[in-house]
Image (cartoon, rainbow, N blue to C red):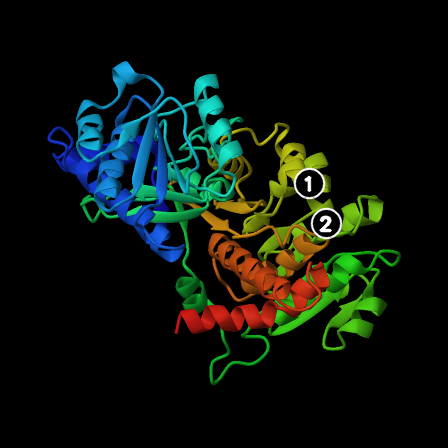
Amino acid sequence: MSRYPTVAQIRAAEAATGLLANGVLMGRAAHGLASAILNHLRDTGGVYGRRAGLVVGSGDNGGDALYAGALLARRGVAVSAVLLDPAKAHPGGLAALRRTGGRVVVEFGELDVLVDGIVGIGGSGPLRPAAAAVLGAARALSPSATVVAVDLPSGVDADTGVVNEPAVRADLTVTFGLPRRAHVLAAPQCGRLVVVDIGLDPGAGRDAVLQSLSDAQVGAAWPVPGPFDDKYRQGVVGIVAGSAVYPGAALLCTGAAIAATSGMTRYAGPAAAAVVDHHPEVVAVGEPEEAGRVQAWIVGPGFGTDVDARARLRTVLAADVPVLVDADGITLLAQNPDLLAPRSAPTLLTPHAGEFARLTGAEVGADRVEAVRACAADLGATVLLKGRATLIAGPDDPDTVLVNEAGSSWAATAGSGDALSGIVGALLATGLPPALAAAMGARAHSVAAHIAAGRPGAPIGASALVAAISDAIRVLRASGA
């Protein structure tokens, strides 16, 4: 499991080593940074004679860059540095750079690598005008140069992942000891991430709230039929979605639930005929009251917000089984919050940012982690906040927020949320805790999107994503074997 500490937790872990004052941690960080850059240069044409430019701020981040530049210069790299505040440049790092032949310049020539050593995890707000001007000129002269961020791209908030424009967009980020929250919350801004071991205590980061499951963990936990299981023991999921005029949400949601290895899928709603026509294994009826026994419900995708939809939502929420509420169901729930009050069985809400605002009465805001924690606590429900970095918080464990970084935006397509509901609902029906089911489903959803995008005919639609779910589960299970 990956853990993403806050700035305060990172600093406490560094201080606990007792190695801050003597410069040992900076030396280890600089060595790891230089090694990552050298590896990149080897992979892209060799080291000797290549050109690296350092944009150096006044703090330890600039010191890391300067010491790393000295190590690069010793290996035959032509290193130049622009000091944004020469009087405050790290004296030891600057002396080391000059001893090895590195040059301090006012502006860069052509570069192969551009190193962002402006501010580290303590930075706030956007790039200052002088820094933005130096970076802009360097990028204009060397548009193909690889941008390497030291610790974190400058202009990105370490704890929230907010990108304060103008900000650095890195191709490679090299960080130290443990990944930061922003590395997962603002992954596209960070590029490829390299985490350098600098000797933090092995227990550092264990108290981090933000965590992510590995593919191996998801695969190992994925429910599979045992030798004595029947369809009921594998989980019966009921779905109320779509409409007679717009059956798409019903088809995508039921198709995803089937692919996610639901033992039985029941459908209740006005799109019953279309569902059975496409998925003959589904047991379909007109209303939830007629569906028979289920072990979890999915309600809301594409079923409208009229009086009939409200009645169906009320019926489903009255059931003493886990319920996943999505899309139109969330809109209705925002209008009728009293529907949650009588529930004792788990409830899982899966809003995107707009639905979250309707549900809570406030925008998500800059700190998505705290927003989803607060929402879960206030509503007494597990909340999955959709996004490229999907966040999941439960009402009973405020010290854990699970995150799934999709790795791409292939799943950002109409109907994709309906498929996600189907996967997660099928997992809920097997008895998995809601937060775990949500995190596992989100991961499978992301992997399916990657698989679908790699097939002929990309870019993908939600139907292609659903068709790739079974393959995604196989990939995850293989990684967890």
Whether residue 294 is visible here, answered yes or no, is: no
The residue that mark 2 highlights is: 313
Quadrant for the N terminus, please. bottom left
Q: What element does badge 1 sit on? A: helix
Residue at the extreme bottom of the image, as rendered? 227
- Position of 69 compared to 305: left or right? left
What is the crowding at mark 2: few (fewer than 14 residues within 10 Å), some, or many (at least 20)?
A: many
The residue that mark 1 highlights is: 333
Residue sitting at x 32%, y 53%: 39
Report the label total: 2
* 2 or 65: nearer the viewer: 65
* 97 or 313: nearer the viewer: 97
Q: What element does badge 2 sit on? A: helix
Residue sitting at x 45%, y 25%: 134
Quarter residue 278 falls in: bottom right
Q: Are marks 2 and 1 in contact (CB under 8 Å)?
A: yes
